[in-house]
Amino acid sequence: MDVVTALNTHVKQSLADVFGVSMTNMIILECSRKAGVAVMGLNTDGYTKLVNTIASDERVVQMLGQDGARAKRDAWAALVK
């Protein structure tokens, strides 16, 4: 699957189910800055950095737990190879 589809269809939707759309957009924006990647023109390496950063974000870990955040990270990463 391409990174844009993975991000928009799976990552954003998973986060929106927990945080709502506005908070999801804020989390993705902040995590893209922390990871040093731009969402526009995202490549596979950038996607991997972004999902790792999202899964380690304090808000995500608090809501999903450490194991839940790792499971999401692994599932998101597996979408793009």
Image (tube, rainbow, N blue to C red):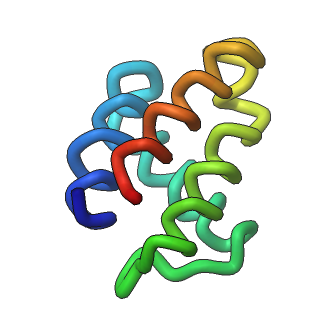
Residue occupying image coordinates x 69% and y 79%: 36
| For residue 19, side relative to residue 52 (left or right) | left
Which residue ends up furthest to the front in the rendered image?
A: 81
Image spot of residue 19 (x, y percent): 46, 27
Judge whether 63 appears above or below 60 on screen. above
Nearest the eye: 16 or 76:
76
Residue occupying image coordinates x 43% and y 20%: 18
Judge whether 79 appears above or below 37 on screen. above
Residue occupying image coordinates x 52% and y 28%: 72
| For residue 2, side relative to residue 21 (left or right) | left
Image spot of residue 14 (x, y percent): 36, 29
Count all numbered tags in the image, as a single digit.
Answer: 0
Task: Give the position of the C terminus as an image quadrant.
Answer: bottom left
| For residue 1, side relative to residue 33 (left or right) | left
Image spot of residue 59 (x, y percent): 70, 31
Judge whether 8 appears above or below 17 on screen. below
Image spot of residue 46 (x, y percent): 55, 73
Task: Give the position of the N terminus as an image quadrant.
Answer: bottom left
| For residue 51, side relative to residue 65 (left or right) | left
Judge whether 46 appears above or below 12 on screen. below
Residue occupying image coordinates x 57% and y 51%: 51
Residue 40 sits in quarter: bottom left
